[in-house]
Amino acid sequence: MALVGLAFIPWYIRIMGPEAYGLVGFFAMLQAVFMMLDMGLSPTIVRETARFQGGTSTANDYRSLVRALESIFFGVALLGGIALFFASESIATYWLQSESLSSESISLSLEIISVLVALRWVCGLYRGVISGSQKLVWLGAFNSIIASLRFVVVIPWLIYAGATPEYFFAFQLGVAIIEFSGLMIYAYLLLPYLGPNITIIWEWSALKPVLKFALTIAFTTTVWVMVTQVDKLILSGLLPLSEYGYYSLVVLFAAGVTLLCSPISAALIPYMTKLEAENKHTEMIDVYRLATQFISVLAGSATVFIFFFSIDIVEVWSSDTVMAEKVGPLLAIYVIGNGLLAVAAFPSYLQFAKGDLHLHLLGNIIFVVLFIPSVYWATVTYGAIGAAFSWASINCLSFVAWLPLVHKKFAPGLNLKWYCIDIGIIVAPMILMGIFIRNITELSGGRAGNFAALLLIAVCLFLTGCSASSVARKNALIHLSRIVGTYRL
């Protein structure tokens, strides 16, 4: 999904223009802001589904919870969508700064976006049921189909119907309807059958056992959305839509690092929760460390690669030297924050599995108190590059200063091993390799030649990380011995 989304962005910019793509970035920001209305319900259904799979709740209680959450999801989506719909004209007229798009075109696009955002948000409930049931192969395949429709099929549609933001978002609305229908149908197939004569009604009592957990998640989600979206919200009002489009491009490209890791978290959270529910704490910690090493290799190699070769990557990707000069330096700074975030998210998975989010809540409060003033000042003073530096700095501070406290409470004795063995020993060789390759490499072989060279560099960094990971080495030796044994036979 990440690769498909990134590969076709240059087509959107060429066909629609940077201003229209700025609207796409604004839509992504609105979708993230809409998560503040989630009230912790999506993570709650993932956790409760995993706990039901682990045998800690009855089928009737679980179905009652799903029904109660459905009512809340649909109600909030309706209210939020209506509010955004009626605010569309004001946002188009007084907030967004456009030079070529008319306010009528922007307003109509925002009205379509209001329906689209609400519909895609409701999908979170059914995606949570599927993810908590650990049906991740089906979910991954379905997401890939939806991503292909959303990112690839939209291009011939724009060529045929017209390269306007209205037609773009109308197509996305059609894809969202397909996504919603597919997720809802499959989620209902996974729900336990209670019998032909049993009717499930909405009951407040179904929410009481999970209310404290859900409200804690809700607050931390709200704080986290504020932290991750405040720079985009500020810049959307300060920058022209064309410049905002380029910044949105940086954010999306850097998000490729965390998108690579999202399947791991989708698998890890319900599995760790299930192990903890079964009192298998040692096994849960083993899985936690294994996944950390995997992400250190994956996100670490991607971050190092993008940091050292950001301008070259954007130029090969877009064949646009001007865009590369604008986007490359911003991307190099911003991706550091996302690389740290990919690994720093792991202690939150540990707290989630334990069902104790007090430290997570406190950490997010401290994070937002420090970040929002700093990013506002940096954005107003230095523009986009200031926002990128603030993002990287605050994630670095959180990674170094806060995570040890989480490990001390939930996994005593793990912190030093986690930092040194599961992260440090893996990432350090990749950084040294990146410095070495950057100093000896001069890319000037044309687009095809530079693409081949960058691909080779990426593979080299990935293999460097693999060779430094104890888990990767162990598995490589196991597979090698099997191959040798088969060959001898």
Image (cartoon, helix red, strand yellow):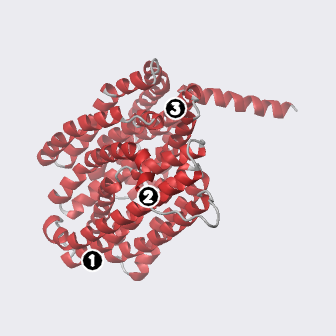
Q: What x and y, as percent, mark residue 473? A: 61, 27
Answer with mark 1 or mark 2, whichever residue precedes in sequence: 1
In the displayed orientation, state which residue is furthest to the right. 489
Mark 1–mark 2 Cα distance, whole angstroms, equals 39 Å
User: 304 or 278, which lies in front?
Assistant: 278
- Mark 1 crowdedness (10 Å alpha carbons): few <14, some 14-19, many ≥20: some
Q: Which mark is residue 288?
A: 3
Label 3 is placed on what type of residue?
A: Tyr
- Tell me if residue 130 comes above or below residue 200 in the rendering: above
Answer with mark 1 or mark 3, whichever residue precedes in sequence: 1
**Mark 1 lies on residue:** 108
Label 1 is placed on what type of residue?
A: Leu
Left or right of 57 on screen, residue 393: left
Mark 2–mark 3 Cα distance, whole angstroms, equals 36 Å
In the displayed orientation, state which residue is furthest to the bottom. 161
Q: What x and y, as percent, mark residue 186? A: 58, 63
Secondary structure of the residue carrying tag 1 is helix
- Tell me if residue 310 comes above or below residue 422 in the rendering: below
